[in-house]
């Protein structure tokens, strides 16, 4: 039996467990929830999933979703 745990990894290295499966290039909020486009406002902190890594050890599978901060000029092009 394998236990699967998912984490979002912020740019500063902090990790937070999540129950979601994220996709590459998906734009998410500070809590790892996907944002719907077009955005209602650009006055927010948003991240993009830029790397997904699977780490497997005896009976444990960790899925790490690495996030990068989306700059304001890119948020502006996403609506708002």
Image (tube, grey):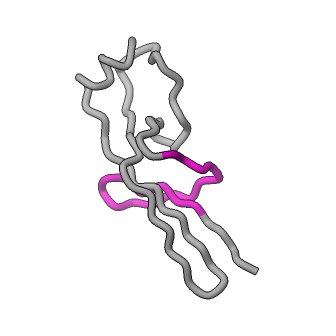
In the image: residue 60, left or right of residue 24? right
Give the farthest residue toward the right: 1
Q: Position of residue 12 (x, y in %)?
A: 30, 56
Q: Position of residue 28 (x, y in %)?
A: 47, 37
Give the farthest residue toward the front: 24
| Quarter of the image where one finds residue 74 | top left
Does 19 lie within the magenta span? Answer: yes
Stretch in magenta? 6-23
State whether residue 51 is above or below residue 39: below
Q: Quadrant of the C terminus?
A: top left
Q: Quadrant of the N terminus?
A: bottom right
Q: Position of residue 10 (x, y in %)?
A: 38, 53
Does 74 lie within the magenta span? Answer: no
The tally of labels here is: 0
The residue closer to the viewer here, 71 or 59, is: 59
State whether residue 29 is above or below residue 76: below
Image point 31% across, 17% down: which residue? 77
In the image: residue 75, left or right of residue 32? left
Image point 65% across, 53% down: which residue? 19
Q: Position of residue 14 (x, y in %)?
A: 39, 60
Give the farthest residue toward the bottom: 58
The residue closer to the viewer here, 11 or 24, is: 24
State whether residue 41 is above or below residue 26: above
Image point 34% across, 61% down: which residue? 13
């Amino acid at each position: 039996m394998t236990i699967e745990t998912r984490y979002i990894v912020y740019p500063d290295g902090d990790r937070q467990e999540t129950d979601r499966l994220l996709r590459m290039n998906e734009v998410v909020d500070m809590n790892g929830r996907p944002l719907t486009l077009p955005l209602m406002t650009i006055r927010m902190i948003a991240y993009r999933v830029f790397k997904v890594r699977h780490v497997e050890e005896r009976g444990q599978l960790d899925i790490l979703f690495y996030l990068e901060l989306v700059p304001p000029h890119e948020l502006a092009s996403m609506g708002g």
